[in-house]
Amino acid sequence: MEQKLPLPPFTLETALQKIQLAEDAWNSQDPQKVSLAYTVDSEWRNRNVFVNGREEIVKFLTKKWEKELDYKLKKEYWAHTDNRIAVRFEYEYRDKEGKWFRAYGNENWEFDENGLMAKRYASINDLEINEADRHV
């Protein structure tokens, strides 16, 4: 049985650990690695795109990071309960034309008993920025 520590129910300490692990994985920009944190039938909403399962996660992230160059993400704790964590996040990237963007949003995560994320719902807004205004 696959497990991804820490396991629910989450404490503040283990929720913070889970968030840092997610941030590190996404910043690796390795779709296969990222997908292993999710259940095989994980359900996502990312903006207006619905993704189901690891295979679709890998395809989605591969396309994402082909377009979002120099991607850098920061996640921050918002709240947690037994098997759920909410985060706010900010990430920056540049497109192929060299324009820089900052994306802001919130994610709600639900985990199974093995610590794999079964549901991920992300609301995201993008803002074009000047390179000199980058935060991340």
Image (cartoon, helix red, strand yellow):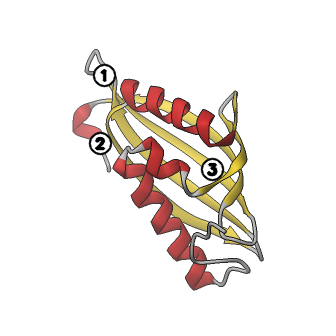
- Give whichever of 52, 103 is nearer the camera: 52
**Left or right placement of residue 131 versus residue 2 in this view:** left
Kind of residue at badge 1: Lys
Q: Which residue is mark 2?
A: 134
Locate residue 115, reporting x and y percent: 66, 69
Seen as rendered, the residue at the extreme front is: 1
Near mark 3 (Cα within 10 A), the count class, few <14, some 14-19 or many ≥20, is some
Nearest to N terminus: mark 2 or mark 1: 1
Quarter of image, res 86: bottom right
Q: Are marks 2 and 3 in contact (CB under 8 Å)?
A: no
Residue at point 53%, 66% (across, down): 19
**Left or right placement of residue 133 versus residue 8 in this view:** left
Q: Which residue is mark 3?
A: 106
Q: Secondary structure at mark 3?
A: strand
Q: Secondary structure at mark 2?
A: loop
Q: CA distance from mark 2 to mark 1?
A: 12 Å
Q: Which residue is mark 1?
A: 99
Q: Secondary structure at mark 1?
A: loop
Nearest to N terminus: mark 2 or mark 3: 3
Locate residue 106, reporting x and y percent: 63, 50
